[in-house]
Amino acid sequence: MKKRIIFATGNENKMKEIRMILKDLGSEILSMKEAGVDADIVEDGMTFEENAEIKARAVARILTNDIVLADDSGLEIDYLDKAPGIYSARFAGEDTSYDIKNRILLDRLEGIPEEERTARFVCAVAAVFPDGTVSTVRKTIEGRIAQESAGSNGFGYDPIFYVPEYGCTTAEMTPDQKNELSHRGKALRAMRDILKEKMSEGI
């Protein structure tokens, strides 16, 4: 029987993306909440990879027979010394809406020319397997900070992340387009290849 895949998140938007990308593994894919885990995890790593692994290990200690995945992702803005970076979710306060977070970032970049507005979304995904081994992948999507928020398809910082090749923000893309291009989509596909290989070995 295939191992369940538990993703250490309570974010429903994220779970939709995850299920779309990992569906061909043929495993049941659950959020930690759906798996009955209510853990308060302290993300005190200094990199995206460390934080993803901290989350995955915390849940794997409870669900020892499952494959546990976790991601840590964020926005790096070069002009702001790669802020908000690993603090993206906590930037301007964890309970602050993304409309406000996005507004603060747009205000900080007011008057800054296009060529200096370079930014990237980063996503690291960690997998902890029942045998205790860990695999981590990191992927990015390059773009720049838009002059104004646009689009309502995405979430988080999507409305201000502009992708020049597509002439739009990631919040203006269709879910399929975004999964194809996004940092999380790329990282999940890279992790899917690792999972397939591990599963073929009987893990």
Image: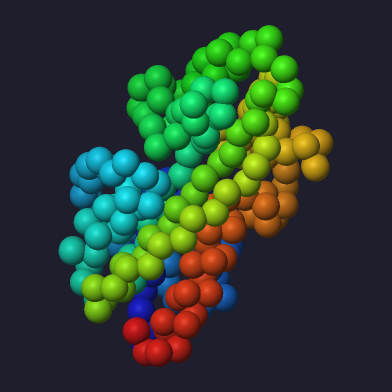
Task: Residue at the far left: name it.
Answer: 61
Of residues 69 and 37, the one nearer the viewer is 69
Q: Is residue 14 left or right of residue 202?
A: right
What colour-coding does the image apply?
Answer: rainbow
Residue at image location 49% in from the left, 26% down from the top: 81
Q: Which quadrant: the N terminus?
A: bottom left
* Residue 153 in view (yes/no): no
Front one among 10 and 76: 76
Q: Is residue 92 above or below residue 84?
A: above
Q: Is residue 26 above or below residue 103?
A: below
Q: At which x and y percent is residue 187? A: 53, 59
Relative to residue 57, is residue 94 depicted above or below?
above
- Left or right: residue 37 compared with residue 157: left
Residue at 32% of width from left, 51% of height from top? 50
Q: Is residue 165 visible?
A: yes
**Residue 144 x %, y %:** 67, 31
Locate residue 103, reporting x and y percent.
56, 16
Q: Residue at x 65, y 42 (%)?
A: 142
Residue 25, percent from left and from top: 51, 77
In the rendered view of the protein, which quadrant contains the C terminus? bottom left
